[in-house]
Image: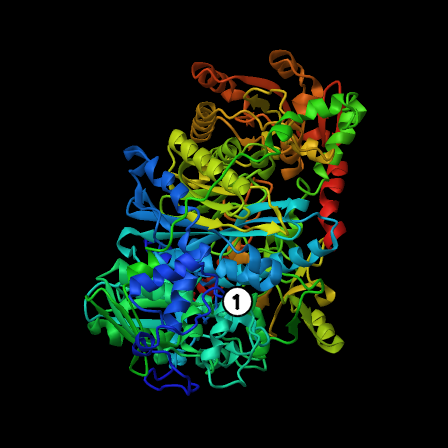
Amino acid sequence: MTDQTSRQATATFNIDTVEHAAQTPDTELPWAELGLKQNEFEEIVRILGRRPTAAELAMYSVMWSEHCSYKSSKVHLRQFGEKVTEEMKKDLMVGIGENAGVTDLGDGWAVTFKIESHNSPSYVEPFQGAATGIGGIVRDIISMGARPVAVMDPLRFGAIDHPDTARVMHGAVAGIGSYGNSLGLPNIGGEMVFDPIYQGNPLVNALAVGVLRHEDLRLANASGVGNKVVLFGARTGGDGIGGASVLASESFDDAKPSKRPAVQVGDPFAEKVLIECCLELFKDSLVEGIQDLGAAGISCATSELASNGEGGMNVELTSVLLRDPTLTPGEILMSESQERMMAVVTPGNVEAFEAVMAKWDVEYSWLGEVTDDNRLTITWNGEVIVDVDPRTVAHDGPVYDRPYHRPSYQDALVADTFRSAVDAGRVPALPGTGDELRAAVLELMSSPNLADVSWVTRQYDHFVQGNTAMAAPDDAGVVRVDEETGMGVAVSTDCNSRYTYLDPYAGAQLALAESYRNVATAGAVPKAVSDCLNFGSPEDPEVMWQFAEAIRGLADACQQMGVPVTGGNVSLYNQTGSTPIHPTPVVATLGQFDDVSRRTPSGFHRDADGQAVYLMGVTRDELDGSEFARLRDHLGGVPPQVDLATEKLLGELLINASRDGMIDAAHDLSEGGLAAALSEMVLRFGVGARVSLDEVMQRDGVDAFTALFSESQSRAIVAVPRTEEVRFKDMTTARGFPVARIGVVDAASGALEVQDQFVLPIEELRERWAATLPEYFG
Amino acid sequence: MSTDLPLIGDFSTAGPVLTGARVGVVTFPGTLDDRDAARAVRLAGGEPVALWHAETDGGAALSSLDAVIIPGGFSYGDYLRAGAISRFAPLMDAIIAAAGGRDGSGSGLPVLGICNGFQILTEAHLLPGSMIKNDHLKFICRDQALRVENNATAWTRDFGTGEEITVPLKNQDGQYVADEHTLDELEGEGRVVFRYVGWNPNGSRRDIAGISNAAGNVVGLMPHPEHAVEAGFGPDSDHGMRMGTDGLGVFTSVLASIAGETK
């Protein structure tokens, strides 16, 4: 334990005080190097009535960055708040704006979850980038007063055979595993997509789920004049400073380290201790407000805590415990060193707070106190270096309504349908015979985006905490919350960015539809949404159009489906050179189970032998943007039709069927259509099935190829015990939902048989399916 | 279980206690599977008791206990060698003494080390050999088949010798190594308690997954029996998805041993 009163040696700086700034209005400041635009710098000068000090400039520059201020996205994100009904808000305890949204689960329980990006760091340094992505999102969850109970990681990399992909993939997966496993958080699912569009800009998103009792809810506000402000956890170092290095000119000491890592370095052990330590603080009600330190570090934590509370705060910056005593005030304010938390503690709880720190061997230092003067005042050895209205830093950043227009290429893209490409001979003839279809199924299931991902998931602990009821490869991750009743939650993240590229409005809706469907297929009632909006540069009007359309689509869809967006994250400027990534709004849906023992497995178990296999929903000729089209290097046309009312009805039917014991297996149809879904269902437990496409082909007017590979939405396959068939059919008929009995589970066959077409032994399928990732990654 | 139990890591609240046996579960900084081990003890019918690594009066803390489990995790982040720091915890001296000492001659307190706990027991020299990084250099999490090679220990008496069980395995440093002489001695004295079946997941010598001391009261194993104790939350099994409960036998075994001794 550290004596928090002992000041470490700090370098001698030519401190740019507020007083000095007022006296030297004409000093040149490196605002452009810090990423500020001229109008933004002028606005800062207007707010302050003088030039900012170096420390103030550091704070404004990071807090007004795209990442922290959402300046380009704010005008669009408002829709998530506007398009919310009272009904949708019923269980919403904390909405957008806090560290993470909180949803009521009943019986005094609540759940918080959020998804965030850590894309750029994960490209520069995949291991640490991905690891600290987990670390950051987990601290958001702790900040709400919750115990983290699970993580998920949607990943998108470049082409599987590109030499750089292995570097990023190995590092990111190892980083996620190393950090998450060491925290004792089960990794319950995610996504894995390979596409050249992500070659120079992989997407590493991370989601965390936490649970809490209502009384443990904490918010990021500094309330109570005279309460103490404390920084605890890891020491502050020079990592993750990035642009702040231009402020090094304020230092006298030229010998300081010049190159510092722009990517933060993670210490999962420190974070694990921090989790337990925070939970002990919450249990004994020792903190009034709490905020994790992520992007923009102390700048963000102090300005947000102050502006959300009584309005003011005094902080003495030399009290910050440092790893590197040469850091300048500006660098200390901007440092993104990991595993740090800031809290507000009443004077009466100081001693008890320190006892908890001592028990867990966590370092801490008291930085200052809460005031009611609406000023955030930061001093350096007593000299005032920051004197600002914290709201102007945290909330009143610039807002841009950036110009956007439909891309010039969009019409040609939409006109180039898969069928037209086939007709024109730009895509080889489609498989028609049974042998050709069989070969196509094998090709599909061994393709990078549908192949077995256990190379990845085996590196993640999904058992720890003992509450995991379902994890990858099932449709959703499921964890129990209440051990007495079995109540729990399901989460799934999804986005098909090929669809979103073809039509951002529809594509974003399809992302919600798929994650909603996955949660419902598992048997849970969808309740809330978090989104990670990965796009290119907002300064490109065509990208901005994709963004605006996707937000509008997602907000409309959430309203129609009745699930509120509770939080999330925007990641812009994702591009390789001047080529933006496909718009990738990853949608995470969270659902609730009364009892997780009702969860529905995504494959046929041996006990399901002889059960009837039903295909729910209608199959149309929808191959544009499909996985099969990807196999033929085609991307054009329009994505599958969106029908949210049908999607919601399918969800209701799946949930009811699971609650009433009418189904023993269920799997949604998405990428790869029926072919992929059936393959995955027989692969799950190695139990085969015999199906016939006749009824579907006749009823829906499609050929065998289309029946197998179309990606029509609002579909699922279920296994229904013979004794439940009448009830199941009565239910679907009564609700007017089309179903077709396509076959039976056949354990003895050891194969997927599509009658009149082909027989595919599971072992042959498994061999091809399992070989792909090891072939490229060892 | 009380409702706040999964949230705050306090698992000392008594549950349905069948045997009256009290089993300590040690928490170090970085321990992860402590609440899971406590749950396993409770589901087997015992009463779990939380033990803190920094307990200075370990003798007194252990005196009211019938057995101790050192659970899995990454104590001190495994930043040095796994278990190398934890073994110096004040409580460990008391555990070593209560277990009958390092020579393994005593028939003392039953002690089970799981995963990181096994690593700590080897670092503490209660068990021979050591654990190094998996031969494939990656963390691995899978449903693992094991053969119970010796059912004469305090932690395996509810199994049959030769019985095959499936429990989760999850580790980074799980490759058991020892010199040939030690390995021959372990084999000769029947102290190889669990062996990997089907596939050796980490390159362990002679497929060893778990061993005991000479007296059989101290057992260490890499796989996690505490994650196969509750239907719906364990490994996949013939009974369905995540329905495997083969690990429960480890915990019922020690409760039976305790009950047997007090008769």
A631 over B136 or under it: above or below? above
Q: Which residue is mark 1?
A: A264
In the drawing, does residue A531 fall left or right of residue A381?
A: right
Chain letter of mark 1 equals: A
Which residue is at 75% across, 35% downward?
A: A443
Image quadrant in which the C terminus of chain B is located: bottom left
Label 1, residues with CA under 10 Å away: few <14, some 14-19, many ≥20: many
**Residue A369 visible to the viewer:** yes
Give the SS element for disc 1. Answer: loop
Which residue is at 45% across, 47% downward?
A: A479
In the drawing, does residue A736 fall left or right of residue A774?
A: left
- Report x, y in % for residue A548: 46, 38
B101 over A636 or under it: above or below? below
**Residue A282 visible to the viewer:** no
* Location of residue A15 by image quarter: bottom left
Q: Amino acid at mark 1?
A: Gln
- Report x, y in % for residue B149: 66, 61
In the drawing, does residue A173 fall left or right of residue A356?
A: right
A475 over A608 or under it: above or below? below
Which residue is at 69% across, 42% downward?
A: A451
* Location of residue A275 by image quarter: bottom left
* Location of residue B144 by image quarter: bottom right
- Report x, y in % for residue A151: 49, 52
Q: Which of A173 and A294 lies nearest the eye of the viewer?
A: A294
- Report x, y in % for residue A435: 80, 25
